[in-house]
Amino acid sequence: MKTTLFLAAVSAFALSATAFAQPAAAPTTPVATAPLPAAVPSILIKHGHVYTVGAAGTLADGDVLIQNGKIVQVGANITPPAGATIIDAHGKPVTPGLMVSWTQLGIEEVQLVSETNDSAPNQALDSAAFDVADALNPSSTLIPVARIAGVTRSLTAPVDCGDVFCGTAAVIHLGDGPDLIVKKQAGVLVELEPNGGEHQANSRPDIWVKFRETLDDAREYWAQRAGYHRPGGARDQRSIRVDLDALGPVIQGQEPLIVHVERASTIRQILAYTQANKLKLIVAGGGEAWMVAKELAAAHVPVVIDNDLNLPASFSDLGATLKGAARLDAAGVVVAFQPQNDGPAHYARTITQIAGNAVAYGMPWDHALAAITRNPAAIWGIDSSYGTLEAGKDADVVIWDGDPLDLSAPTAVFIKGVNIPLVSRQTKLRDRYRDLNDKKMPFAYR
Amino acid sequence: MEPKNLPLWGAAAIVVVTLIAAWAFLPSLHKSAPKDVQVADQFPNDQFPSTYKPYPSKPTLIRGATVLTATDKEIDGGDVLMRNGKIVAVGTNIAAPAGAVVIDGKGKFVTPGIIDIHSHLGVYPSPSNEATSDGNEATRPTTPDVRSENSVWPEDPGFTRALAGGVTAMEILPGSANLIGGRSVVLKNVPAITTQAMKFPGAPYDLKMACGENPKRVYENKGGPSTLMGDVAGYREAFEKAREYREKWRKYWKAKKAGKTDADEPDRDIGLETLALVLDKKIPVQMHCYRSDQMATMIDVSKEFGFRIAAFHHAVEAYKIADLLKKNDICAVMWADWWGFKMEAYDAIPENIAMVDHAGACAMIHSDDPIGIQRLNQEVAKAMLSGRRMGYDIPRAHAVEWMTRNPAKALGILNQTGTLENGKDADVVVWDGDPFSVYTHAEKVFIDGALLFDRDNPALSPRSDFEIGQEDNANTGGAGQ
């Protein structure tokens, strides 16, 4: 759709991102610092109802061949290479692994246990430099919980922090660690609504004063960065150096601002500002974004929405409706879904339900599937390596026990070609307690 | 006025506040009292009485649908006949009475109205802001004197959205900041401008209590409790006071009955009066408790003082003690897949409801959320499918009870609603497909036989006062939003 607008951001500061800017047809060495298994044998998924979410559309009886972590062929009646593991999908749906946009996967274990929650900067700091990449924990129990529900990628970002700049996001995969990072500096989260009075700033004008001043500071700083540290080399700026550094790719239009905004008027305002200043904008939240759909589509600005949030939860989203995603989509806006709840990271697995409900309220089914695969890949600039079942892409592949948008579950999940065991801390708890009658020994011995 | 001149519950009514209330609500008081009135011997329990009356309805026959009766029965090509607000026939080939509205149920499903046993609609309404947060009287850890019904804002747009999700009744609870949070109230989900006009007639009150992290988080720097043992000490202290309070009044009533006109009437305490009614088992407890050990502790506390816990809410570890819950006849109120937002929610699993049900205990869904309440059918579907994937045979005819029959049972209103059986309130939902699919909508929602939401008819999509005149913002508002 609007993928051209979201060329992979190649930031001078995001070394790991560079590999993903290369053409999809030329598989590249993954940049993960951890070595992949030396020789990943071929895997051939046979007889799937294959939703490629790409140009090939849907194959009623299709095969997907995986080698060395990549998809090498998608089609009918693929001849298995010697030694290939063959998995019969028995006609069940096969899709790309799913991507959840805006979660705290990897930076939050228990939301209310502060030592496990790295999702927001100290409120006293106006912190674009706060970077989730510094906190990613590949051992988080949330990752298996999400991936056995088919989620293989996440835009891991800070939460609303009660200030204007809430920090820097990263794209991660949910496969085996230790390095989960697919792309650093995937965007800087900005909170522009008063958020029910929980914002440090008292009002929208206050927020805008701070927002504009910080970006002005960043431009001024970057214009004379070399001289910044000389005495008298730069004026005193409210923002601290690390934040101004972090905003470099933003003011250069390379890294997007992920702006949490709900009210139509605020969306129009941030749209005008980012266009005038040639910044890349991604609207997050967007309860009333559908009311600005035409303008957003014309400006090629995508919207990352939890379409289930249909209540006037605040005066900023009186217009929120279950039909929002469908209206945005119909207007040509690139839509991606995110679960925005009290514990977004824990509810990453509800992303298929959110997509399914968007279908129930008017979004075409294939567009809703794209909103959790191809669209986020494009929005977050990783579409050269992920988002569709096409040769050359990372082999994030899911086989489902039914319609993937209708409360189904995976029967197999591959991330970068690795067959992920369908096990999580939750499945282990389930198995430990499934027989309460056997009390020969305490449960702790199971 | 002398206490002996008051009707049944009059002893306590000497307190001025109550007298005023009594004068307003009990017409009998306006007349001169009869000479030989019995002396009261129990605590009053009927303040803020329901003024709800079923809305006018037409005899309605839903014909040829898949009917999930919530009595473990699925009827293909089934009919449901409603008349005068009641279900009068469920089966096949039911003849339409003269003048009845006949709804073609082909391809559609019929279930009882969904009952959400745990909602904060109205007390934490939309929009949420400093003026509308009325769900926690978090000024002291024990507040049995407060009632959620006195906080409910009937104009909460969330009620209309829940109606569009097939919810016909719900219990509105105080929040969980307090050990004893106050009385809950059961409402019919009818648009109204007073809370009394929503109150489910005949539904008992419940007492909301809370285990675990929340009270100690709120009070750790406000004089406690700051520990779990502090929590439990707090419940026990409160119920010990209630026991003494009840004793005082019993002694007084006994003395009055024995003709001792000089017996000193005890001072009335609104909070202890509620707790005394809990000890009398007139008010069951709805107990917010996540962990298995906390639930077991609360069962023991309930036995020490003789109160009844109807259900453990948010019981994310119920699957670990399903046998104990069954033995004690206590229901577990659960989410499908919420977890991890706090430490005591860390062990939640999606199979929880199915495992509790499989063990023969009483299991049900709840929302605790104005978004989740709109899709409890999907939450049940997730729980059902999780159970099936671990090998349990869970027909949808059974799973539907997790959102209808079982919450009705735990609320003490199963004799009135919760199943499709003759004589029950006609709280009925017509779905445009299998309710356990995301693509299915509640199409028509009947409460006491009155069609109060119809997805195909914009005139039957209620909008709260708050949403009127917000067209520029909200476009449509209302139940179908």
Image: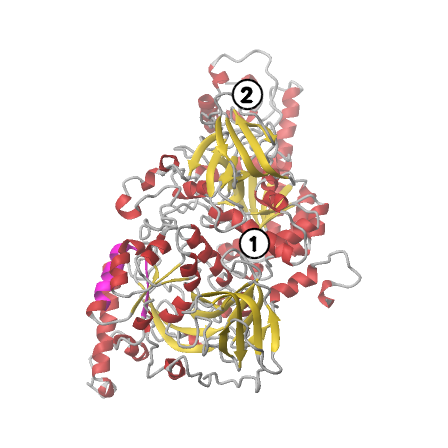
Have a look at marks 1 and 2 and say if they share a chain. yes
Q: Which span is picked out in magenta? A: A257-274
Main SS of residues in magenta: helix
Q: Which element type, helix, strand or loop, lies under badge 1?
A: helix
Q: CA distance from mark 1 to mark 2?
A: 56 Å
**Point 41% across, 74% down: residue:** A170
Q: Depth check: B260 or A205 in front?
A: A205
- Under mark 1, the amino acid is Lys
User: Is residue B125 part of the magenta span, yes or no?
Assistant: no
Q: Which mark is residue B3?
A: 2
Q: Position of residue A148 (x, y in %)?
A: 56, 66
**Point 45% across, 50% down: residue:** B371
Q: Confirm whether residue B175 shows in the render.
A: yes
In this image, A221 relative to A60: left or right?
left
User: Is residue A269 part of the magenta span, yes or no?
Assistant: yes
How busy is the neighbourhood of tag 1: few (under 14 within 10 Å), some, or many (20 plus)? many
Q: Position of residue B101 (x, y in %)?
A: 47, 27
- Under mark 2, the amino acid is Pro
- Pointer 2 indicates a residue of which chain? B
Residue A270, placed above or below residue A11: above
How busy is the neighbourhood of tag 2: few (under 14 within 10 Å), some, or many (20 plus)? some
Residue A44, placed above or below residue B409: below
Q: Which mark is residue B382?
A: 1
